[in-house]
Image: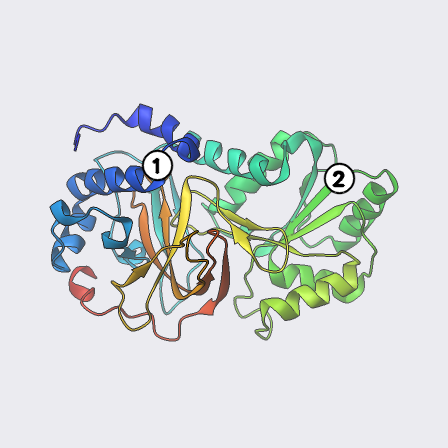
C-alpha cells in the first residue's frame, strides 16, 4: 500500500473509475483515510477493525452519518474553501462537510449531470428551491447555481415563490419545444400544482425530496402520482444527494436510482451494522436493509458513510430509497460522539 497517495492523480483517476477496479480504488482510499483522518481512524479502532485485514469493501467500516454533526471530518490538514451545512432540526443539529477543493465538487456534479442528462447548455434549468435558498452553504444550491450558469439559457434561474412566472415560463418553453428541467423541493412542487395544471412534453420534473414539516408526510409514490397527474408528465425524476457526499445518484423514474461510476451503494443489515452486502451481478439477488455509500470523490472527508436511509439494492447496482430508519443508533459507535 502506498500511503503517500498522490492526490492530484487520484482526483483525475476517480472519474475514470469504470476503467479501473472500483473495489481496489475504494480499498486504497480506505487505507489513506485511516492514516490521515483522525476521527475515522479512531472510529475504525473503536470497532476493533485491523486495517491490515481489510481486503474487501464488505470489511470496510462505514462512518455513521451523524458524526458529521458532532465531529470535524477531515482527511489531511487543510483550510476548507467552503463548508457545506445541512438543514438539520432543532433536535439533531446540522451536518458540516469541510470541502477542501470546491472545483472537485463542481467537476463531480457536472460530469454526473452530463452522464445522465447530457450537456447543460441543451437545457433550460428552472429551480424551485425556496427552503434551500433560506440557508447558507447549501451544497444543492451551489450545484444548481452552477448548472444554471452552464445552461446559458436566458430563462434559466431560481423561481422562488413566483409560481405565476414559473407557469408562464414552462408554457413558453413548451411552445418552443425547449428541453427544460424543473428541479424542486417536494413541498414546493406540490404547492405549485395546487394552483396550476399542465401537460408538459418537453419538461423533466425532478424532485429533490424534503417536506421538513411543511406538509403532512406522504410517500414518494404518492408525491409522484400527484405530480404526474397535475403536470402531465410520464415519470418524475429524482436526485439523491446529501451534504455529506460530493456525488449524486439520479432516478429517471419509478424511484430507481443509479450512481455514477465513482459512487456505489451497499446495504447493511438492520440487526448487524457491520454486516455489509454488495450488489452481485452473478446472483441477481436483491438486498434490503440500510444504505451505506462509497463516494470516491470524498477524498478529503470520509468516503465510507453509513446513512439512516432504508433501501433496496438490485444486482445491477441500482437502488431504491424506502424511507428513514426508525432507530438510527448503531451499537458500539457512541465512543466518538462529542
Q: Residue furthest front?
A: 282
Q: Quadrant of residue 271?
A: bottom left
Q: Quadrant of the C terminus?
A: bottom left
Secondary structure, mark 1, is: loop
Q: Of tags 1 and 2, which is closer to the observer? A: 1
Q: Residues within 10 Å of mark 1 (few under 14, many from 20)?
A: few
Residue 161 place in picture, x, y as percent: 69, 55
Residue 111 place in picture, x, y as percent: 52, 33
Q: Quadrant of residue 16?
A: top left
At 21% across and 36% down in the image, what residue appears? 76
* 242 or 12, nearer to the observer: 12
Residue 128 place in picture, x, y as percent: 65, 51
Question: In this rendering, is residue 196 above or below 104?
Answer: below
At 40% across and 34% down in the image, what residue appears? 17
Question: In this rendering, is residue 234 above or below 82?
Answer: below
Among numbered discs 1 and 2, the one appearing first in the sequence: 1
Q: Is residue 20 in view from this perspective?
A: yes
At 56% across and 37% down in the image, what residue appears? 115
* Numbered tag placed on residue 179 in the rendering: 2
Q: Quadrant of the N terminus?
A: top left
The CA distance from mark 1 to mark 2 is: 36 Å
Would you name the residue on which mark 1 appears?
Answer: 21
* 218 or 97, nearer to the observer: 218
* Numbered tag placed on residue 146 in the rendering: none
Q: Quadrant of residue 114?
A: top right
Secondary structure, mark 2, is: loop
Q: Residue furthest right?
A: 175
Amino acid at each position: 500500500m502506498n500511503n503517500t497517495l498522490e492526490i492530484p492523480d487520484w482526483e483525475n483517476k476517480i472519474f475514470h473509475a469504470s476503467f479501473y477496479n472500483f473495489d481496489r480504488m475504494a480499498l486504497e482510499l480506505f487505507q489513506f483515510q485511516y492514516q490521515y483522518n483522525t476521527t475515522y481512524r479512531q472510529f475504525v479502532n473503536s470497532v476493533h477493525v485491523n486495517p491490515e485485514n481489510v481486503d474487501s469493501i464488505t470489511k470496510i467500516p462505514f462512518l455513521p452519518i451523524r458524526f458529521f454533526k458532532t465531529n470535524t471530518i477531515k482527511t489531511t490538514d487543510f483550510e476548507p474553501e467552503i463548508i457545506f451545512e445541512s438543514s438539520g432540526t432543532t433536535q439533531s443539529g446540522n451536518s458540516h462537510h469541510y470541502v477542501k477543493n470546491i472545483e472537485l465538487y463542481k467537476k463531480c456534479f457536472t460530469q454526473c449531470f452530463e452522464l445522465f442528462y447530457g450537456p447543460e447548455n441543451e437545457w433550460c434549468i428552472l429551480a424551485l428551491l425556496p427552503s434551500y435558498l433560506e440557508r447558507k452553504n447549501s451544497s444543492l444550491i451551489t450545484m444548481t447555481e452552477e448548472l444554471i450558469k452552464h445552461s446559458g439559457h436566458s430563462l434559466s434561474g431560481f423561481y422562488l415563490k413566483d409560481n405565476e412566472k414559473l407557469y408562464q415560463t414552462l408554457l413558453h418553453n413548451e411552445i418552443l419545444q425547449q428541453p427544460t428541467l424543473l428541479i424542486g423541493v417536494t413541498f414546493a412542487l406540490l404547492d405549485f400544482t395546487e394552483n396550476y395544471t399542465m401537460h408538459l412534453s418537453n419538461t423533466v420534473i425532478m424532485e429533490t425530496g424534503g417536506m421538513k414539516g411543511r406538509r403532512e408526510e406522504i410517500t414518494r409514490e404518492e408525491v409522484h402520482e400527484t405530480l404526474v397527474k397535475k403536470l402531465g408528465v410520464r415519470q418524475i425524476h429524482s436526485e439523491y444527494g446529501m451534504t455529506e457526499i460530493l456525488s449524486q445518484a439520479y432516478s429517471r423514474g419509478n424511484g430507481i436510482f443509479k450512481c455514477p461510476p465513482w459512487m456505489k451503494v451497499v446495504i447493511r443489515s438492520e440487526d448487524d451494522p457491520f454486516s455489509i452486502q454488495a450488489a452481485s451481478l452473478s446472483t441477481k439477488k436483491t438486498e434490503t436493509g440500510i444504505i451505506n455509500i462509497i463516494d470516491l470523490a470524498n477524498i478529503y472527508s470520509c468516503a465510507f458513510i453509513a446513512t439512516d436511509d432504508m433501501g433496496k439494492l438490485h444486482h445491477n447496482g441500482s437502488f431504491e430509497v424506502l424511507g428513514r430508519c426508525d432507530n438510527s443508533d448503531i451499537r458500539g459507535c457512541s465512543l466518538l460522539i462529542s
